Image (cartoon, grey):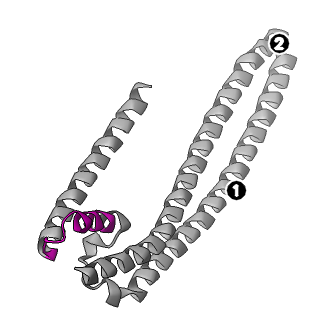
Amino acid sequence: MNIVLNRLTKAYDICQKAGEHDIAKIEIEQQNQKIEESIDNQIKKGVLFDTLVVLVGTGLFYFGRLGALIYLVVVSLITLAIIAHLFLDFYEKKARIRKNEEIIDLEKRESERIISEHEKELSFLPQEFRNSEAIIYMLHIIKEDEGYSMESIFRMCKSYMYSLKCQNICHTRNSHISKIWI
């Protein structure tokens, strides 16, 4: 069982290195999501400001033809300025998102490279257990009782990973529901 313990410890170190890149990838994806939300917010603010300008500008019709001309010029210029600002900001943020997506791709490839580089050391583990959470759980089982066979450890780990997946799905669903109600 010491051999299995050593192999699992090495596998944990390898998966931890690969997991660091996965965590960086997730953080960058969250940054992209925040950027997209800020784009949406700026578009909403621009539309609201433009609507406000139109509403305030309608008071210029009180001055007749000259007021209507001033109204058209002012509203057109402000609308063009808002559109130009939104487009420039939109393209700048989209460029940042594209750059972040390239970084995400690099992080993903680096994580895969680490795993494939150490494929021989991880060959005893099924593909679904090549992550640090599963390995920690297996190490915990072995430390509790060394009498389990690898097949039974894998079965227990599969059950544990399934329950984690269900918890994550429920948590995600509940967080979306709470956002709707807020």
| Residue 176 versus residue 54 in the image, above or below | below
| Mark 1 vs mark 2: in front | 1
**32 relative position to 173: left or right:** right
Q: Is residue 144 magenta?
A: yes
Q: Could you tell me which residue is drawn at 74 percent across and 24 percent down?
A: 53
Bin the neighbour count of mark 1 within 10 Å (Cα to Cα): few under 14, some 14-19, many 20 and up.
Answer: few
Foreground of the two, 74 or 144: 144
Residue 171 position within the rendered picture, expressed as x and y whole percent measured from the top left: 33, 42
Foreground of the two, 86 or 137: 137
Residue 49 position within the rendered picture, expressed as x and y whole percent measured from the top left: 70, 28
Q: Which residue is mark 2?
A: 64
Q: Magenta region: which residues?
A: 135-150
Q: Report the magenta stretch's main SS.
A: helix
Q: Could you tell me which residue is drawn at 58 percent across and 53 percent down?
A: 31
Q: Which residue is mark 1?
A: 92
Residue 110 position within the rendered picture, expressed as x and y whole percent measured from the top left: 50, 78
Foreground of the two, 48 or 124: 124
**64 relative position to 107: left or right:** right
